[in-house]
Amino acid sequence: MSDLRVLPATSARLVGPVGAAAAGLAAFVFVGVVDPNKPGRYPTCPFLAVTGHWCPGCGTLRAMHALARGDLATAAGMNGLAVLSLPLLGFLWWRWTARAWSGAERPRPVAAGWIWALLLVIVVFGVVRNLPFGAALAP
């Protein structure tokens, strides 16, 4: 009898991870079906429109479209940082799901140093892809 009461509590804890996975999968399928390489399908990057330079996210839609089609090389060429971040995001989602399933307490907040390091990687990627020697990183 006590096992029946555990299931609703577990289900409630899994709403976040399952909802996030469903939303991410829906977005991935949408980008896989609606080709971002065709003009007019998606809005232009505002940073690119204003400055004429690639932002760290430029090429991510085209990279995800290529991944949905099974073309890892093209995806990495469009936005290597986005492609490299997917295994990390998958691991973080899996950890979130495992904690929700088991009912473990929420982990401590991430140390500020990790957040600053991530921000630095994103900014450096965005700058380098706009420099002559980093042209291979541009979409």
Image (cartoon, rainbow, N blue to C red):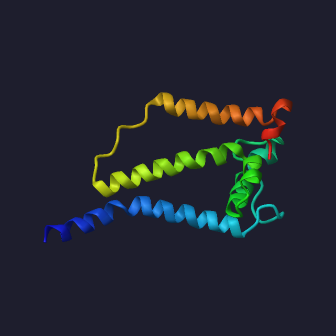
| Residue 45 position (above or below residue 5) | above
| Residue 78 position (above or below residue 20) | above
Q: Is residue 17 left or right of residue 54?
A: left
Q: Is residue 5 left or right of residue 53?
A: left
Residue at 36% x, 61% y is 14
| Residue 85 position (above or below residue 128) | below
Residue 64 location in percent, x, y?
68, 57
How many marks do you count on the picture? Answer: 0
Q: Nearer the viewer, residue 41 or 99?
A: 99
Q: Nearer the viewer, residue 2 or 24?
A: 2
Q: Residue furthest left?
A: 1
Residue 28 location in percent, x, y?
62, 63
Q: Nearer the viewer, residue 15 or 72?
A: 72
Residue 73 location in percent, x, y?
75, 51
Residue at 43% x, 31% y is 111
Residue 133 location in percent, x, y?
84, 30
Q: Quadrant of the N terminus?
A: bottom left
Q: Residue furthest right?
A: 132
Q: Residue furthest top?
A: 113
Residue at 73% x, 48% y is 76
Residue at 68% x, 64% y is 31
